[in-house]
Image: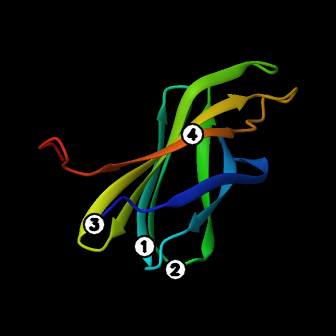
Amino acid sequence: MSAPRLDIEPLGVAKRDGEGWRTTWRIANAEPDAVRVVGAVAPHSQFRGEVSVDREIRAKSSTQLSLVVRTDGVAGGEIENAFVILVVQHGVDRWRILARLRVPLDADARPRPRVEAVTAQRVGFSGEL
């Protein structure tokens, strides 16, 4: 089975949530079959967060997902090469959908992520988990 075709884009403006920022993402499924999102992580040291999810996205539809991230940057700065990684079940295969980000920080150090590229990797493709 080929890689699932998902589009990921930030929605709205991040809102303060405790020590982090609540970011909201639109995930659109271009596939003719449903996919199931089972996790999301932002692993960059300056843009970090993780959430467990169990959400089906029907064929040709979309959903929204919130992810609280902690940022380590200064107002007016920018975080480069950050990622939001979705773990997705597509048929019998599990995939990582990697959205590479550039994250400008506004005058309040609020993150305003922009997706630069989306790629997919089958979990276990290299013999690793």
First in residue order: circle 1 vs circle 3: 3
* Depth check, front residue: 129 or 62: 62
Residue 94 shows in this picture: yes
- The residue type indicated by label 3 comes to Met
**Label number found at residue 59:** 2
- The residue type indicated by label 4 comes to Ala
Q: Position of residue 48 (x, y in %)?
A: 52, 37
Which residue corresponds to the image point at 70% horizontal and 39% vertical from the top-left? 114
Q: Circle 1 sits on which residue? A: 35
**On screen, residue 6 above or below 119:** below
Mark 1 or 2, which is nearer the eye? 2
Q: Circle 4 sits on which residue? A: 117
Badge 1 marks a residue whose secondary structure is: strand
CA separation in Å, label 4 and label 1 = 20 Å
Identify the image quadrant of the N terminus.
Answer: bottom left
Badge 2 marks a residue whose secondary structure is: loop
* Depth check, front residue: 103 or 117: 117
Which residue corresponds to the image point at 62% horizontal and 72% vertical from the top-left? 62
Q: Circle 3 sits on which residue? A: 1
- The residue type indicated by label 2 comes to Ala
Mark 4 or 3, which is nearer the eye? 3
CA separation in Å, label 4 and label 2 = 22 Å
| Residue at far right of view | 107
CA separation in Å, label 3 and label 2 = 16 Å
First in residue order: circle 4 vs circle 3: 3
